[in-house]
Image (tube, grey):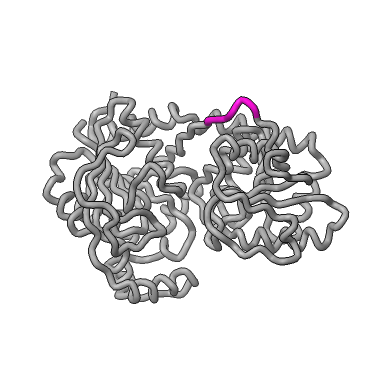
Amino acid sequence: MKKIAFVVPWYGDKIPGGAETELRGLIKDLQKNGIKLEVLTTCAEKFMSDWNKNYYKSGDYIEGGIKVKRFKVRKRNTKKFDEINFKLMNNHRITIEEEKIFFEEMIRSTDLESYIEENIDEYSLFCFIPYMFGTTYYGVKKARKKSVIIPCLHDESYAYMETIKEIFNISSASIFHAKPEQELAKRLYGMENIKIPILGEGLDFNIPNKLEGFKEQYNLKNPYILYAGRKDEGKNVHLLLKYFSIFKEKNTSIDLDLVLIGGGEIQIPQNIKKNVYDLGFVSIEDKYRAYANAITLIQPSINESFSIVIMESWAVGTPVIVNNKCEVTKNFAIESNGGLYFNNYFEFEEILKFYINNLNIVNKIGQNGKKYVFKNFDRKIVTKKYIDFFKELVGEEN
């Protein structure tokens, strides 16, 4: 097998985000198992940076032992992009012409596209992650049947663009994390002649030996529920704050706090400020202690193709509560019997009260999740699945 290129909008060992974290773990595991690979990316810093700005100089880098090639970003019309992106974010229909403008004016590197075209024979495969960025859209068009898309697909307005359907059907394969994600892709894009395996996501669990002491360390007096991840509307944290606020108003006799960990900022309603602890980024050790000492992790997002935080919570035996509108996380909860899901406030309240009042049963639910994680998402198992699939694609099956 020749080299495999992983193509991504930005890359760095310290960049947060689910797709970014997954990519770093996957390529390091593949390299440890003898797969020759490189990362092809832009000179942009990260998702929350200016996509017109070349934060890095173009050229070759070594990041965490991985060879990285960086290419200058193309200057873009931010105003045009933002106008169309606003429509998509608010679920408004856009025209085919607007779809074209969306990709032309989003993060893009024509230098990267030219490199793929001119050096295509040096690589066995080009793996693009995630689906909705210019690096994937234009890159797949250059690599075509050498393309593999790892889409991190959500049921969202971007997924319904006609131009997106094209790249899924000119590639050789798309790799999915979960069955609902695969089913969504089949429904939207057809993909009758495309390989579409579900390979999951390999996880490393650096769980500390001592899980006690988190509440004392952060001066938490009451039992608490936990949210872990970015604090923005795309993750539906505002809904969690709203529901928690109603819960506190209706259940004044229940001592309960909400702990938030992760990046970003969000306005906390005045009436619950004394019961919400926003700890920001914490160490890996403290993150696991936060999971282990919580009644439950709540994942309110409806746009997930996986959920690392759910798996981390289960890894220490803590059950979860997820949103019924997210097919992926709901499917994980059902398959594992490691959590429950809500469709509205009243279901949220009843689940939460059940968890608070039935800690023995809740512990069993958490243990179900723990068994599920270590059976299905052990890093060695998933890495082998990827290697076997790549060999199959290039005709080197064992």
Q: Nearer the viewer, residue 275 or 162?
A: 275
In the image, residue 117 lies at what x, y percent?
15, 51
Is 56 left or right of 196, judged from the image as shown? left
Q: Compared with residue 122, is residue 209 higher up or lower down, i.e. above or below?
A: above
- Majority SS type along the magenta span: loop
Is residue 193 something one can see in this rendering? no
Residue 248 located within the stretch drawn in magenta: no
Residue positioned 58% across, 42% down in the render: 310
Residue positioned 46% across, 74% down in the render: 92
Q: Nearer the viewer, residue 63 or 140?
A: 63
Residue positioned 66% across, 58% down in the render: 240
Magenta span covers which residues? 206-210
Q: Nearer the viewer, residue 81 or 341?
A: 81
Which residue lies most toward the top here? 398
In the image, residue 113 lies at what x, y percent?
19, 55
Q: Compared with residue 139, is residue 123 higher up or lower down, i.e. above or below?
A: above
Quarter holding the C terminus is top left
Is 10 left or right of 321, judged from the image as shown? left
In the image, residue 387 lies at what x, y percent?
33, 31
Residue positioned 63% across, 54% down in the render: 323
Is residue 136 something one can see in this rendering? yes
Is 270 left or right of 189, judged from the image as shown? right
Looking at the rendering, which quadrant does residue 243 occupy?
Answer: bottom right
Q: Compared with residue 286, is residue 151 higher up or lower down, i.e. above or below?
A: below
